[in-house]
């Protein structure tokens, strides 16, 4: 279907679909049934092809890698590029995301450890990135997520790295200093906060509101306006807040939609965050390196010498080779009292010649340069 076949408000002009300009509901449904049959047949054809991919990987690779982030990014980008509507690019990409998730699960189910408990935004990020057929496992803290992947208990891990209003998650940066794992992907999640109640909550008697301290901060103005007298109680996670209100009739919780579903709660007020662009970026960690996808980012960890102009020596080669940086963070390199490491994200892949040239030049001037990973830029 071309763009001219649908009007801007999404209503299909039906001339090309039906002989009569006013088809009956039954006629339309009959067409839907036959389209569904075709989609169904094609889905299983695709799934069978994925099974063949698995057979081929097992025959040709010593330790076959079933999840291929670069290929998934290419498939999703192609879906969005060729999309003609009326479905939006995001909607078609989301549907194909789930199709690939189901196909990958047929090849080999993938275990994904995430910063739990169940119902956190990190679980939402894991599902957004891997789709509903990944086996997601909640893990109590960020270090443990790293350990689960290092030990091979989980294939991949998902950890938060930065929030647009709260800044970088230092704990995650620090975990990379002592871990051999690679960054193999990134995912961005719009963070919407909601006021949740349980079956037993008496809405007129809410005197206490639980949430993680960051979420309470993100909804401060809304709470001042709507619940100025309620006590705000910070707990270890939004999911913990959701769990707590199941047994307290005078309490509500602030948490995301995943927590509402997970704990069977009702959203009393949706999207109550003060900043509507509130976004959190998460990293996917794994044991393997990812080949070039065509639109990639690279994360670096650099320990500089303690001398004047050290940062300039790092930045100049990037400028010289036309490489854009998307983030620079500094962390103390414990146990050295005044030594620092830089975490740098750039646009490009370490296997591209201009990126490789810049990295080689920088390596010659610093104490240590470690490529944490090159990975496809977030598609969805
Ligand atoms: O192309 C592959 O390597 C596949 O395994 C197939 C497929 C897909 O369904 O398209 C499934 C899982 C991979 O992560 C990437 C793509």
Image: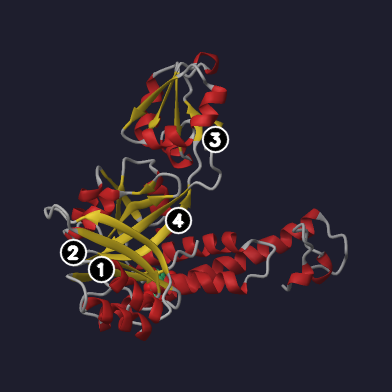
**Residue at left offset 35%, top offset 41%:** 118
Q: CA distance from mark 2 to mark 1?
A: 7 Å
For numbered disc 3, what is the local secondary structure? loop
x then y, percent, for residue 87: 65, 61
For numbered disc 1, what is the local secondary structure? helix
Sequence-first tag of 3 and 1:
3
Of the two numbered discs 2 and 3 in the rendering, the one whose residue sits closer to the viewer: 2
Q: CA distance from mark 4 to mark 2?
A: 34 Å
Circle on res. 198:
none
Protein image colouring? secondary structure
Q: CA distance from mark 3 to mark 4?
A: 19 Å
Q: CA distance from mark 2 to mark 3?
A: 46 Å
Q: Is residue 240 above or below residue 46?
A: above
Of the two numbered discs 3 and 1 in the rendering, the one whose residue sits closer to the viewer: 1
Of the two numbered discs 4 and 2 in the rendering, the one whose residue sits closer to the viewer: 2
Q: Is residue 45 above or below residue 105?
A: below
**Residue at left offset 54%, top offset 30%:** 222
x then y, percent, for residue 276: 56, 44
Tag 3 and tag 1, C-beta contact below 8 Å? no
Sequence-first tag of 1 and 4:
4
**Circle 4 is placed at which residue position?**
188
């Amino acid at each position: 279907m071309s763009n001219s076949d649908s009007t801007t408000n999404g209503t299909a002009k039906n001339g090309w679909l039906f002989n009569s300009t006013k088809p009956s509901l039954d006629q339309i449904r009959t067409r839907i049934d036959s389209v569904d049959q075709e989609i169904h047949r094609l889905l299983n054809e695709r799934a069978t092809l994925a099974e063949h991919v698995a057979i081929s990987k097992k025959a040709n690779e010593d330790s076959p890698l079933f999840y291929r982030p670069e290929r998934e990014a290419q498939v999703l980008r192609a879906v969005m590029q060729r999309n003609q509507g009326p479905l939006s690019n995001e909607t078609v990409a989301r549907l194909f995301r789930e199709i690939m998730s189901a196909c990958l699960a047929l090849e080999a189910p993938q275990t994904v450890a995430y910063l739990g408990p169940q119902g956190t935004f990190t679980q939402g990020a894991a599902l957004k990135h891997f789709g509903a057929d990944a086996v997601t496992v909640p893990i109590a803290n960020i270090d443990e997520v790293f350990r689960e992947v290092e030990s091979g208990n989980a294939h991949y891990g998902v950890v938060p790295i930065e929030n647009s209003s709260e800044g970088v998650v230092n704990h995650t940066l620090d975990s990379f200093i002592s871990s051999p794992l690679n960054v193999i992907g990134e995912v961005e999640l719009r963070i919407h906060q909601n006021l949740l109640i349980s079956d037993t909550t008496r809405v007129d008697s809410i005197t206490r509101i639980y949430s993680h301290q960051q979420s309470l901060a993100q909804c401060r103005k809304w709470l001042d306006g709507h619940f100025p007298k309620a006590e705000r109680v910070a707990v270890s996670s939004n999911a913990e807040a959701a769990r707590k209100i199941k047994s307290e009739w005078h309490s509500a919780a602030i948490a995301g939609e995943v927590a509402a579903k997970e704990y069977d709660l009702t959203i009393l007020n949706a999207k109550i965050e003060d900043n509507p662009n509130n976004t959190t970026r998460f990293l996917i960690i794994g044991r393997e390196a990812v080949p070039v996808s065509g639109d990639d980012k690279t994360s670096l960890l650099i320990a500089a010498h303690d001398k004047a102009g050290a940062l300039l020596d790092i930045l100049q080669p990037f400028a010289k080779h036309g490489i854009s940086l998307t983030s620079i963070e500094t962390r103390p390199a414990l146990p050295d009292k005044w030594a620092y490491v830089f975490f740098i994200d750039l646009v490009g892949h370490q296997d591209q010649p201009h990126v490789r040239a810049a990295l080689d030049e920088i390596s010659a001037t610093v104490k240590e340069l470690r490529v944490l990973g090159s990975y496809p830029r977030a598609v969805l």
